[in-house]
Amino acid sequence: MSNCDLPTWRAKGLNNWESNGRTTPVNVSGGIGTSRFAPIRIACKPEAVLLTLTAPE
């Protein structure tokens, strides 16, 4: 379950987003807080993600 318009299989984790013939990796975090509409977390552990970006060689 998610509170956004992403398909649920793309609501968390690393996925490829395809648009206009191009593919881009997208990382969606489960987040660390709660929603103001539902101040609880069920089956979604809080997480913070550290991404290290490197230039292609």
Image (cartoon, rainbow, N blue to C red):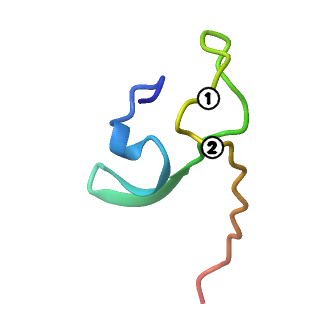
Residue 35 at x, y percent in the picture:
64, 19
Q: Looking at the picture, which amino acid does disc 1 mark? A: Arg
Residue 43 at x, y percent in the picture:
52, 38
Q: Residue at x 33, y 36 (%)?
A: 7
Residue 4 at x, y percent in the picture:
46, 25
Q: Quadrant of residue 23?
A: bottom left
Q: Secondary structure at mark 1?
A: loop
Rendered image: mark on residue 45: 2
Location of the C terminus by quadrant is bottom right
CA distance separating discs 1 and 2: 7 Å
Along the horizontal axis of the image, is 19 left or right of 44?
left
Marks 1,2: beta carbons within 8 A = yes
Rendered image: mark on residue 41: 1
Q: Looking at the picture, which amino acid does disc 2 mark? A: Lys
Along the horizontal axis of the image, is 17 left or right of 12?
left
- In the rendered view, would you say 1 is above or below 29? above
Q: Quadrant of residue 15?
A: bottom left
- In the rendered view, would you say 43 is above or below 19? above
Spot the residue most to the bottom.
57
Along the horizontal axis of the image, is 57 left or right of 20?
right
Q: Residue at x 72, y 38 (%)?
A: 32
